[in-house]
Image (cartoon, rainbow, N blue to C red):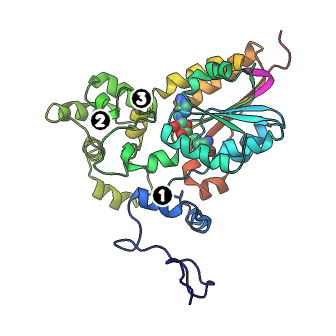
Amino acid sequence: MTEQPDNQSASGDKPRRRKRYPGSHPRRFEQRYKELAGNPEMIKHVRGRRRTPAGSHVPVLLREVIDTLSPQPGQIAADCTLGYGGHATALAKAVQPGGRVIGFDVDARELERTKARMEALHLPLSVHHANFAGIAKVMAQEGLDGYDVILADLGVSSMQIDDPSRGMSYKHDDVPLDMRMDSRRPRTAADLLNSLSQEELSQALWELSDEPDHEKIAQWIVSQRAVTPITTTGQLKGLIFAAKGTVEKLWKKQSAYQDAHPAMRTFQALRILVNDELAALGQLLRLAPQCLRPGGRIGIISFHSGEDRLVKKAFRSGYDQGIYEAYSGKVIRPSGREVHQNPRSSSAKLRWARKASAEG
Ligand SMILES: C[S@@+](CC[C@H](N)C(=O)[O-])C[C@H]1O[C@@H](n2cnc3c(N)ncnc32)[C@H](O)[C@@H]1O
């Protein structure tokens, strides 16, 4: 009898069995990541349960991005936020033959993995470990006179949120509050929590995530750090619950998981602050007109009102000045079906603009 791999039945026609772990399922992120790599059946199964498989990311508004940005064979597309490469893969297929995608990401760890995955598919891609605020510099390095398409899908990927070692999610307890997408950045979330003034914290929570209890949370942070530095996700979560006058167990019982998690807004605001996300977006919006070829299209997917306001204002003012010949009057949102299949798409908003075809 031939020996079977340990996850396959002797007859070969039964479904593959999962590898056994202490307990019955892989618990740690790295184990889940490893298990899913190269196992399309398992990935399909996880997606069917409306979950994002560990170590992957489901691209949001994919059809809408391709419809509005209309990449054509032979064109150059900049994917400013490569992530898992979902949008980049669709863009790369659309610009063939003869075209190319220039991919940016500040996250070196994920960039290498995405590059390898896309190279295996023989897709034309040049990657840059760079902030998209440097889009003009990369254009010069690549010897280009402009891009036909620019896409930015803002925020963080599912890989980053799900990886506990990054400290980005309130779902993980007691891991260091890092939150940097780019490990070259000087300050972590813990650094900011322990150094910003109460007013600065309160303002950030309000402006970057519309947190209604911004004043109380900032007050709790400042009084707690006078006793002991705030360094972990669990500590911060505890403070947020205290500021809101409840505890996690009670909240879970009362909300039945229907409401947004009370810590969601604070974690989002801190992440945006740590990575200076609004400044990078502002710079991209300023440089886009000079980086687009005549008739070129730009699309931005944002996930909160502060970002969306900047995008809307930049496109409208570019249109008023005659830089853009058209722009999306109305924001494009995911369909109910998309939100059902990928709940993480629920707050996504796409806006686009088209550069005037002829100068002047
Ligand atoms: C929402 S994910 C993009 C997912 C991607 N569209 C896909 O389909 O897989 C955002 C990605 O952008 C990166 N990112 C965020 N801000 C950036 C910036 N200013 N410059 C370059 N990359 C950035 C993050 O590291 C993350 O990998």
Return the residue at label 3. Answer: 184
Label 1 SS: helix
Numbered label attached to residue 217:
2
Q: Which residues are magenta?
A: 292-297
- Along the viewing direction, whichever of 174 and 182 lies nearer the viewer: 182
Residue, disc 1 = 33
Task: In the rendered structure, find residue 279 and report the number of the disc placed on it.
Answer: none
Q: Is residue 74 above or below residue 161?
A: above
Say if the magenta span includes residue 218: no
Q: Which quarter is ligand 1 in?
A: top right
Task: Report the amino acid beneath label 2.
Answer: Ile
Which residue ends up furthest to the left in the rendered image?
A: 227
- What x and y, as percent, mark residue 280? 53, 24
User: What secondary structure prevails in the magenta region?
Assistant: strand
Q: Residues within 10 Å of mark 2 (few under 14, many from 20)?
A: many
> In terms of sequence position, does the residue under pointer 2 or pointer 3 come before the other?
3
Residue 136 in view = yes
User: Residue 332 sits in which quadrant?
Assistant: top right
Of circles 2 and 3, the one toward us is 3
Q: Residue 124 is drawn in which quadrant?
A: top right
Mark 2 touches mark 1? (CB < 8 Å): no
